[in-house]
Amino acid sequence: MSFSNTVKRAWNDNRLMSVLLELTYACNLDCTFCYNDLTLGGERLSLGQYRSLLDDLASLGVLNLSLSGGEPLAHPRFFDIASHARSLGFVVRLKTNGHAVGESVARRIRDEIDPFLIEVSIHGAGAATHDRQTRVPGSFERLVANIGTMKSLGLRVKVNSVLTRWNEGEVEEMLDLFDALDVLHQID
């Protein structure tokens, strides 16, 4: 069956095709516009509960699984959860701020998860605006370096940007940056 027929059948049968799973409230950045409340601790599911949930989603025929947070890599069992998802055949997308995806983490992501796409967030055309919005000095330079590392390891990277008052005057420069980084992009 073709992908378009699969989508059509899922739509007509009101079947769940995609799931966004937020693994944690924890994050290593503190973006000014983020809906995620860093003060919320919540109660994490156990690894067994995550595996059971993923097994259930697979049995429902879910195709696409996006892992997010907070920062999903901040979850202490991230690799166990994501590897199990991949073993079930999900098309895995990772939504991360990219701050923790240095070379060793990027290699593990590639080798253990092989995600369809890694989505990272850039919030300005340069460090001044991006770091102002993340409230973490140096986060822009680190992210740009990590994007280069991910791409050099063959990982597919897409940049998501939230349009704010602080970066609305930098859209053209942001687009130039995305072209220079050779990444897909989306501005919301």
Image (cartoon, rainbow, N blue to C red):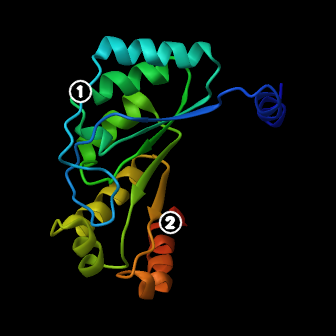
Q: Which mark is residue 9?
A: none
**Residue type for callout 2:** Asp
Asked which quadrant contains residue 94, the reply is top left
Q: Are marks 2 and 1 in contact (CB under 8 Å)?
A: no
Q: Secondary structure at mark 2?
A: loop
User: How would you rate the neighbour count of disc 1 (Cα within 10 Å): few for under 14, some for 14-19, many for 20 or more?
Assistant: few
The CA span between labels 2 and 1 is 39 Å
Q: Amino acid at mark 1?
A: Glu
Q: Quadrant of residue 68?
A: top left
The image shows residue 138 at horizontal and vertical percentages of 17, 68
- The residue sitting at 22% across, 43% down in the picture is 26
The quadrant the N terminus occupies is top right
Q: Residue at x 27, y 41 (%)?
A: 25
Q: Is residue 35 left or right of residue 20?
A: left
Q: Secondary structure at mark 1?
A: loop
Query: Which is nearer the eye, 20 or 143?
Result: 20
Label 2 environment density (alpha carbons within 10 Å; few <14, some 14–19, many ≥20): some
Where residue 153 appears, as percent x and y from the top left, is 40, 46
Which one is in front, 116 or 22?
22
* Residue toward you, 53 or 39: 39
Residue labelled with disc 2: 182
Q: Seen in the image, is 150 located left or right of residue 115?
A: left
Q: Give the image location of residue 76, x and y in percent.
A: 21, 29
Which residue is pictured at 41% across the width and 19% down the height? 84
Q: Looking at the image, which residue sits at the far bottom?
A: 169
Q: Where residue 100 sits: x, y (%)?
A: 24, 48
Q: Is residue 27 left or right of residue 1?
A: left
Pick whichever of labels 2 and 1 is earlier in the sequence. Answer: 1
Q: Which mark is residue 43?
A: 1
